[in-house]
Image (spheres, rainbow, N blue to C red):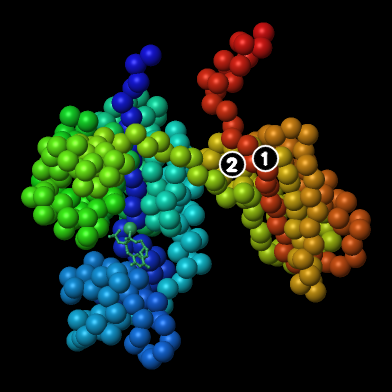
Amino acid sequence: MLMQARVIMLVDFDYFFAQCEELRNPALKDKPVVVGVYSGRTENSGAVSTANYVARKFGVKSGIPLYLAKKRLEGTEAVFLPVDDEFYEQISDKIMRALRGYADSFEQVGIDEAYLDVTQKVHGSFEAASDLAQKMKNAVKRQVGIAFSVGVGPNKLVAKIAADSQKPDGLTVVKPEEVKGFLSLLPVNRLLGVGRKTAAKLGELGIKTIGELARYDVQRLMDVFGKNLGVYFHNAANGVDNEPVKETGEAESISRISTLKENTRDLMVVLEKTDQLIEDIHKELVQRNISFKQVAVIAIMTDLSVRSRSKTVETSTSDVEVLRRAVRELFEKFLGESELEIRRVGVKISSFAKEEAEQKRLTSFFQST
Ligand code: TTP
Ligand code: CA
């Protein structure tokens, strides 16, 4: 069977920590924003995690000392903020969740990058992939309020370099026939694994651009860098990369929790609230194309103690009715066992399985009959 060419995307959130800060405080948007890790020794000791593009115009970027950033931004309305990982994590999860649904397989890399294999989704078409990427950008902008850059290419290596080549809010598509031309004039340090030392070593061989590296005798590269690295450099420079997009684990549970209008022991009042939570959970379930086996309810009582009850349903399912019945059953039982009033209620599902694609299900159906 002929292997179909792959269509791979790399999504990279723009100036991520600083963009998150702009999201919760839009008044920051026109000012230089610097997010830093304060080491706490003196008021200004520490380093810049990232900065928005307004600050970058003043030469402020990831890794430089905070005192230097302060100096470069003197006389501006610059705002300096400490890193708030938990908040960025939350935003990141929201975006990742939204993106997953667009991919055949999805691999999150760190807090602000993800690879998507969309080959099937776009039937191998790079034009369709470009439209899909634009759709993703619009949807995330609308749903979460965050902008990102996308690179589209025939493999992870090209997708990544494509994404880097146009930021922020970029969309760069490199078709298979364009790969060599796209890479050839870029400096070698744009390749993963080529740091300062390697770049210097390559420079000694007269290799400055990826194109020069691509044309260089592979045997000589192997002599200088060893077999594995030599072959890797040769392939990478030629835009060859067969690394698959590896499905990364998704959050192991989905939960929603909410405060009741008034403290209660009334099952109907509780279920009215949990119905809203269930609807929300079910949306995410469908979006992520997974099914659950474990259902738990959480009750936070008026004395703020936290109680929970759980059960395992018979078969893995994504059926919202099964979820509703289980939640009802658990709360019925729980209310019979406790005396305090409930203040907040929660619903949590876990033990996920991937819902099989329709096609696979049909195939196994035919095989089993
Ligand atoms: P990057 O994707 O490298 O940078 P960025 O998202 O800030 O900017 P760009 O628009 O160029 O993509 O890093 C992602 C986040 O990781 C960044 O927002 C902050 C954090 N980070 C650090 O804390 N220290 C660092 O040295 C770097 C490079 C990033
Ligand atoms: Ca980024």
Q: Residue at x 86, y 55 (%)?
A: 334
Q: For mark 2, give the secondary structure.
A: helix
| Res 41 seen here | yes
Screen quadrant of the N terminus: top left
Q: Is residue 279 above or below residue 365?
A: below
Q: For mark 1, give the secondary structure.
A: strand
Q: Give the crowd class for mark 1: few <14, some 14-19, many >=20 residues within 10 Å.
A: many
Q: Mark 2 vs mark 1: give the one in front.
A: 1
Q: For the residues marked 2 and 1, what is the alpha-carbon distance in whole angstroms? A: 9 Å
Q: Residue at x 30, y 36 (%)?
A: 241
Give the numbered dot on residue 285.
Answer: 2
Q: Residue at x 50, y 60 (%)?
A: 90
Give the numbered dot on residue 280.
Answer: none
x and y percent of residue 229 in the render?
29, 44
Q: On the picture, is 221 further left or further right than 262? A: left
- The residue that mark 1 highlights is 292
Q: Residue 152's image quarter?
A: top left
Are the residues flagged by discs 2 and 1 in contact, CB closer than 8 Å?
yes
| Res 172 seen here | no
Q: Give the crowd class for mark 2: few <14, some 14-19, many >=20 residues within 10 Å.
A: many
Type of residue at label 2? Leu
x and y percent of residue 149 in the render?
29, 51
x and y percent of residue 212 in the render?
10, 43
Type of residue at label 1? Phe
Q: On the picture, is 60 further left or further right than 12? A: left
Instruction: Give the mark nearer the N terminus: 2 vs 1.
Output: 2
